[in-house]
């Protein structure tokens, strides 16, 4: 439905027409009718009514003659209101069709994006703008095209009424209309640019609003530490900066539109005065005079505001299409949404051969000529200071980034040659900021075996067994509906777990996974060192015979490792067992000694 190509302003129409051609055509037919009826027909009906009333008062017509123009006038007013309501319903139908057809496409693109775009602020900003604004921008674009069609037809209808009476007035209106439309398009571009700049600030105050000031998860700390006033002031400050950025542009546009309206009003008065003489001489009937005057002053609204507002919205939608173009051009990862293979390959070895890696926005590489090897069935621990590159190694191992120099070999075969599903089945990772899914406990654990499509495909006894191994028996006992109890606070019957219990749920997910390599990437960083050490000991005990990788800058887990690898300055500075490295008296020994009191 969405191709990788250059999107233009006309795509605001092309995209909805592709998914809902009948209702799009119907919408513009209704817009055409709405343009003709209120201007030409209403003006003529008004003229008919006024002239008939004057004729009755002058004794030139019977009193019953007033009913026909009166009913005709009422019918036109009724038609205007009915068509407007139908047009609104049709527009809603088009909007729903657009959302139903294209939002899954947007989500699909997001699911397949290269991981580098997720971590890059600029590209992620485009992703969020397109994801949040596609339906609304297309809807506004359709409105704009409809309004432009309606206004142009209205202008032509009014010009048709006055050209035979005051030809120069029609010429003046035509000459003014074109530059006003062009300037309005420019105003729309400037308005969208201002919105983009404000959006960068908006992310900050929306975070403060949604995550800090109103989120229930932060309620305890807001109360305990009393930082609500400070956060509110920060919210107001950032909101005010964004508001002023938009207001500055909005004022300029508003002043321009207002000055245009005043100019058009002056022209309308001039045309009205020019038509008085034809009425006096009898060349123009009083009713037609009133109809034309009403249409002319309606033109003031059209040219002075409505048409330019439509042009501005059209320009805004056109600028949004440029964002859609950039979004669709973002590179995607092959197999990003593939499920893990149902059966993982037999793991034998993993080797880094002179691997260097630099993040796309970084100035220098975080890994520089890194080489090491890991063998099946052993426990490894990567240690080092924050920012040394430990987590980067995991991102490369699991295939999140493939833009590295050197080779990463799995069973002697380059990592980049493996299908995504094979790599996903090979590793199970518990991250530092592991996810807390607000679904049932059973589903939370079942996600560990993503090759199964739902928890129902995994026997309940299996999930209970894994939960018991992860020491969740006591937690399950307290849950009203056992493992089927929803976790979190989204549902009324949902129950939140303690931090330690959530960590055990994450561990249970990893235990359920059939991946031969288990990785803990500092998932216990928020715990005290003693609790952290206990978690690692429990996990190591559960992983007998498995290959495990512990990532930590705290060293409570390192004694459990068969081999410790110290990462420093993008490479390996030391490696060996705990006892060997302590005897060497190097970086590891210094780090461990500085933390020794934590674990004693």
Image: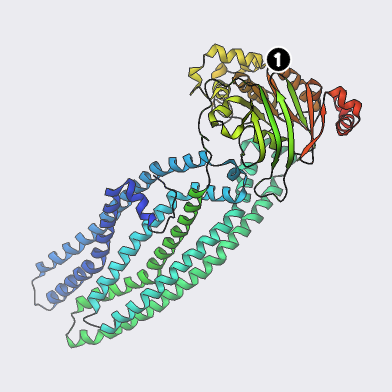
Q: How is the image coloured?
A: rainbow
Image point (44%, 58%), residue name: 317
Asked if 146 appears above or below 335 in the picture, the reply is below
Instruction: For residue 399, say whether it is visible.
Output: yes
Residue 345, x across and y down, in percent: 58, 21
Position of the N terminus, as image quadrant, is top left
Residue 155, x across and y down, in percent: 29, 71
Image point (47%, 73%), residue name: 256
Residue 454, x across and y down, in percent: 49, 22
Please state if 459 lies on the left or on the right of 73 as rendered. Answer: right
Report the front residue among 202 and 71. 202
Please state if 473 lies on the left or on the right of 491 as rendered. Answer: right
Image point (23%, 75%), residue name: 160
Report the front residue among 251 and 531. 531
Q: Residues within 10 Å of mark 1 (few under 14, many from 20)?
A: few
Residue 12, x across and y down, in percent: 39, 55
Report the front residue among 78 and 23. 23
Q: Residue furthest front?
A: 412
Asked if 160 appears above or below 551 in the picture, the reply is below
Q: Secondary structure at mark 1?
A: loop
Report the front residue among 261 and 101. 101
| Corner quadrant of residue 244 | bottom right
| Corner quadrant of residue 156 | bottom left
Residue that numbered label 1 is attached to: 544
Position of the C terminus, as image quadrant, is top right
């Amino acid at each position: 439905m969405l191709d990788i190509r250059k999107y233009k302003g006309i795509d605001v129409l092309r995209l909805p027409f592709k998914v809902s051609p009948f209702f799009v055509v119907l919408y513009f037919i209704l817009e055409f009718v709405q343009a003709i009826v209120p201007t030409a027909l209403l003006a003529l009906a008004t003229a008919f009514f006024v002239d008939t009333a004057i004729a009755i008062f002058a004794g030139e017509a019977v009193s019953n003659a007033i009913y026909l123009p009166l009913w005709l006038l009422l019918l036109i007013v009724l038609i205007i209101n009915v068509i407007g309501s139908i047009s609104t319903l049709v527009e809603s139908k088009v909007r729903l069709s657009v959302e139903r057809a294209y939002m899954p496409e947007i989500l699909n693109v997001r699911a397949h994006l290269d991981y580098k775009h997720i971590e890059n602020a600029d590209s992620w900003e485009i992703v969020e703008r397109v994801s949040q604004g596609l339906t609304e921008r297309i809807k506004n674009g359709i409105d704009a095209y409809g309004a432009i069609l309606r206004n142009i037809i209205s202008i032509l209808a009014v010009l048709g009424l006055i050209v035979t009476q005051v030809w120069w007035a029609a010429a003046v209106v035509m000459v003014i209309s074109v530059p006003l439309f062009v300037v309005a398009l420019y105003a729309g571009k400037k308005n969208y640019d201002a919105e983009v700049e404000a959006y960068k600030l908006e992310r900050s105050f929306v975070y403060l609003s949604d995550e800090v000031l109103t989120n229930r998860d932060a309620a305890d700390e807001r109360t305990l530490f009393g930082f609500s006033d400070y956060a509110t002031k920060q919210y107001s400050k950032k909101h005010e900066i964004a508001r002023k950025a938009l207001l500055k542009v909005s004022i300029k546009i508003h002043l321009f539109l207002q000055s245009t309206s005043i100019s058009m009003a002056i022209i309308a008065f001039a045309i009205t005065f020019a038509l008085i003489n034809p009425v006096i001489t009898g060349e123009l009937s009083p009713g037609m005079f009133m109809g034309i005057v009403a249409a002319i002053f309606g033109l003031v609204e059209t040219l002075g505001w409505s048409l330019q507002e439509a042009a501005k919205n059209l320009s805004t939608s056109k600028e949004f299409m440029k964002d859609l173009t950039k979004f669709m051009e973002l590179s995607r990862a092959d197999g990003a949404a593939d499920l893990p293979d149902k059966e993982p390959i037999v793991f034998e070895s993993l080797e880094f051969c002179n691997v260097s890696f630099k993040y796309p926005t970084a100035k220098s590489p975080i890994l520089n000529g890194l080489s090491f090897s890991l063998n099946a069935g052993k426990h490894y621990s990567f240690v080092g200071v924050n920012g040394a590159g430990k987590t980067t190694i995991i991102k490369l191992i699991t295939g999140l980034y493939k833009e590295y120099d050197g080779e990463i070999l799995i069973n002697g075969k380059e990592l980049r040659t493996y299908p995504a599903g094979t790599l996903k089945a090979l590793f199970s990772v518990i991250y530092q900021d592991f996810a807390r899914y607000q679904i049932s406990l059973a589903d939370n654990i079942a996600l560990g075996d993503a090759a199964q499509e739902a928890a129902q495909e995994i026997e309940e006894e299996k999930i209970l067994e894994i939960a018991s191994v992860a020491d969740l028996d006591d937690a399950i006992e307290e849950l009203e509906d056992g493992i089927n109890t929803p976790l979190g606070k989204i549902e009324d019957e949902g129950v939140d777990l303690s931090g330690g219990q959530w960590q055990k749920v994450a561990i249970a997910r990893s235990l359920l996974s059939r991946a031969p390599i288990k990785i803990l990437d500092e998932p216990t960083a928020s715990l005290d060192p003693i609790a952290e050490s206990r978690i690692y000991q429990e996990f190591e005990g559960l992983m007998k015979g498995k290959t495990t990788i512990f990532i930590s800058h705290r060293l409570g887990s390192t004694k459990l490792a068969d081999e410790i690898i110290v990462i420093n300055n993008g490479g390996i500075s030391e490696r060996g067992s705990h006892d060997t490295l302590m005897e060497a008296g190097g970086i590891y020994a210094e780090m461990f000694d500085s933390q020794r009191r934590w674990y004693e």
